Image (tube, coloured by chain):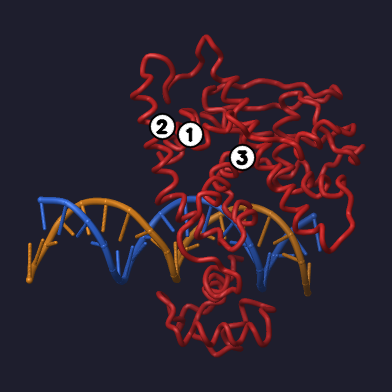
Chain colours: A red, B orange, C blue
Amino acid sequence: MGRAPCCDKDGVRKGAWTPEEDQVLAEYINKNGYGSWRTLPKLAGLLRCGKSCRLRWINYLRPNIKRGPFSTEEENTIIQLHGMLGNRWAAIASQVPGRTDNEIKNHWNTYLKKRLLHSCHSSVARQASTSSCLSIVKPESPSNHHMVQWESARLEAEARLSMELLLINSSSTRKTYSDYFLQLWYSEVGESFRMINGKGGVACESPILQTCSSTKLGSDSDVRLQVNTISAVSTDVTQGQGKSFKVKVEDGIASSESSSCGFLDTSDSALKLLLDFHGGDEMEFLQAPTDSYANSLDSNSN
DNA sequence: AACAGCACCAACCGCTATATT
DNA sequence: GAATATAGCGGTTGGTGCTGT
């Protein structure tokens, strides 16, 4: 039995939405909400697929949608989060208020990616004899350097997110710092942070999670570590508890194939890092992206 | 003025994850 | 647990407007 179509194909309008359709959809949702996107078009009297209605609402009609050019801060946030999360536009969009995943994706593909690539190629031209987009491992261990840079980017982004959480919630609730830290910790961003650091053996463990969780922690094998100076390396990494899992690094993408074990002890230093981290000079590479990152963009686009 | 090439962005398509029966 | 329905996500496409020749 195949998957049922999301809507009847006959008599369904496609293409650009008219202002009249927008008005009908917006009025209906404002009045009734959107219980089921599948049935919504019929109920609202629209000759549209439910999927199309959902997209139109989410990307255009929804309240608090911010339109217009992206600010530098928004762009930096997107760049940082993309470095951490890859093409997970919905996750990125959730940290950029007022912007939709579609908008961010478009902006990335049409502007940011090109800017980063251009920046990389300029950089390559300047330092062709030292390191380049095509370099793999150099004597001064640029791979470690890139690791540090990415770690800094992650921490900076997480610090920003944690501060946002604090600002958002401080006036209305009385949660503790550790609550916010936990909230961040169990977020998507925190998850990638844990997994990545778990691989590297860095002490970075949940304050509460004392037992292995076989569900959430191990569910997302899509966490990507953009270590583009390493190519086609496969290695076993042993975790502190004697459990091991295989980390495969291939063409700049590392993925965890199994990571069912949780993390053991509280890390006040990790909390401190998140709350106190200041980017400083080390964050300059975000303005002029690293060769390795731009290289990953190159390879991803091929 | 006419055309081609390009950039941008809204919308679609196909797939996966999750919920429900 | 299997089958099915639905929501959501990310990649891709197509229309439109701008720019250069």
Query: Crowding near pointer 2: few (<14 within 10 Å), some, many (20+)?
Result: many
Circles 1, 2 touching at the beta carbon (< 8 Å): yes
Q: CA distance from mark 2 to mark 3?
A: 19 Å
Q: Position of residue A182 (x, y in %)?
A: 83, 46
The reply, left or right, for residue A16 in relation to residue A39 is left
The residue carrying mark 2 is A120
The residue carrying mark 1 is A289
Amino acid type, mark 2:
Cys
The residue carrying mark 3 is A84
Q: CA distance from mark 1 to mark 2?
A: 7 Å
Identify the subunit bearing mark 2.
A
Instruction: Give the mark toward the camera: 1 or 3.
Output: 1
Label 1, secondary structure: give it: loop
* Nearest the eye: A149 or A89: A149
* Nearest the eye: A211 or A291: A291
Label 3, secondary structure: give it: helix
Q: Is residue A110 above or below residue A137?
A: below
Q: Is residue A112 above or below residue A196?
A: below
Query: Both on one chain, marks 2 and 3?
Result: yes
Q: CA distance from mark 1 to mark 3?
A: 14 Å
Where is the C terminus of chain A found, in terms of image quarters?
top left
Tell me which numbered mark, 1 or 3, is placed earlier along the sequence: 3
| Count of residue discs | 3
Q: Position of residue A251 (x, y in %)?
A: 51, 29
Identify the subunit bearing mark 3.
A
